[in-house]
Image (cartoon, grey):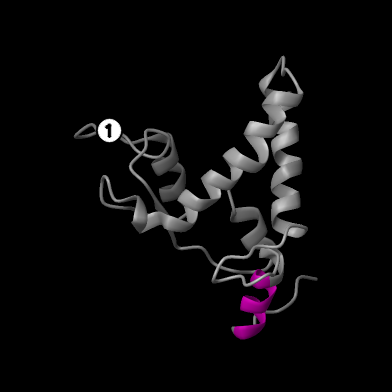
Amino acid sequence: MVLPVYGIFGIPLDRILTDNGKEYTTHWENGKHDYEIFLASCGITHTRIKPRCPKSNGMVERFNRTLLEEFYQIVMLKRVYSTLDELQHDLDKFIYYYNFKRTNQGYRLKGKIPYQKFLDGMRKFSLPEPG
């Protein structure tokens, strides 16, 4: 979750957009998913995209494809994982690389790394640098 990062920079997070997947929400009439309960406890509104409309969440869909092509398809050929912790460790390293080292050629980042774009956005809104 992005809460710790946003907290370091003093950025309030008041809404999260997800798809309607089982990892984020229940489809029971009166049920509440643990994720939704957590968001509510943090004062974060949970907004979901329309079903069967992946274009509504296009950046996430593109990130998922990048994870598949640049991480999973490669590491699964190189190594057999015996535990989820081992896989999580390698995924964490890739996510760090993605956010702090890898340039992104998309139309929004235009060759910058995501962290650079994040800092540019902070400067644009005059948010203080973390101390």
Residue 44 visible here: no
| In this rendering, position of residue 108 left or right of residue 48 | right
| In this rendering, position of residue 17 left or right of residue 96 | left
Count of numbered badges drawn on the protein: 1
Q: Is residue 5 above or below residue 111?
A: above
Per the image, the residue denoted by label 1 is 31
* Residue 43 image offset from top left, x and y in percent: 44, 56
Regarding mark 1 in the picture, which secondary structure is present there?
A: loop
* Residue 58 image offset from top left, x and y in percent: 42, 56
| In this rendering, position of residue 37 left or right of residue 53 | right
Span colored in magenta: 117-124
Comparing 113 with 5, the one in front is 113
Q: Is residue 23 above or below residue 42?
A: above
* Residue 70 image offset from top left, x and y in percent: 66, 42
Which residue is located at x 68 percent, y 70 percent? 111
Residue 108 visible here: yes
Residue 39 located within the stretch drawn in magenta? no
